[in-house]
């Protein structure tokens, strides 16, 4: 639905809708060319999660038109060797 959604509360890399369940999915994408500085998922800190949740709350309130819709927060790790790890429901709304 959207890429690189920005508002004054934060930024969300990908906002998508899962067809099967009509779930709104907020995705954080992290890339590391090597594991020298750790796994990409380790870069999703509690502070980053708070910013994502605030931006998601804004998006949900103003873009969903007041409709009740299930949502979840995913993380996608992209590694230098080309592999990808998708963690569904990586964290809850905070």
Image (cartoon, helix red, strand yellow):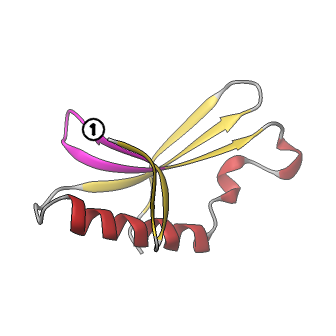
Front one among 3 and 67: 3
Write down the residue under mark 1: 18
Work out whether 79 lies above or below 88. above
Front one among 65 and 37: 65
User: Over which residues does the magenta segment extend?
Assistant: 14-27
> Residue 9 vs residue 34: left or right?
left
At x 41%, y 73%, the residue is: 54
Q: Position of residue 93 (x, y in %)?
A: 38, 69
Asked if the magenta segment contains residue 69, the reply would be no
Asked if the magenta segment contains residue 22, the reply would be yes
What secondary structure is marked by label 1? strand
> Residue 73 vs residue 49: left or right?
left
Which residue is outermost to the top? 82
Work out whether 8 lies above or below 42. below
Q: Quadrant of the C terminus?
A: bottom left
Determine the image quadrant of residue 77: top right
Q: Position of residue 21 (x, y in %)?
A: 19, 40
How many C-alpha atoms fall within 10 Å of the one at disc 1: few (<14), some, or many (≥20)?
Answer: few
Work out whether 55 lies above or below 70. below
Q: Position of residue 82 (x, y in %)?
A: 69, 24
> Residue 46 vs residue 2: left or right?
right
> Residue 38 vs residue 67: left or right?
right
At x 27%, y 38%, the residue is: 18
Q: Position of residue 50 (x, y in %)?
A: 50, 73
């Amino acid at each position: 639905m959207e890429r690189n959604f920005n508002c004054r509360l934060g930024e969300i890399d990908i906002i998508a809708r899962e067809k099967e369940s009509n779930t709104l999915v907020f995705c954080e994408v992290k890339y590391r060319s090597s594991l020298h500085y750790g796994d990409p998922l380790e870069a999703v800190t509690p502070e980053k999660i708070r910013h994502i949740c605030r931006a998601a709350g804004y998006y949900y309130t103003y873009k969903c038109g007041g409709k009740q819709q299930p949502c979840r927060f995913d993380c996608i790790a992209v590694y230098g060797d080309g592999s990808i790890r998708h963690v569904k429901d990586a964290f809850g709304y905070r």
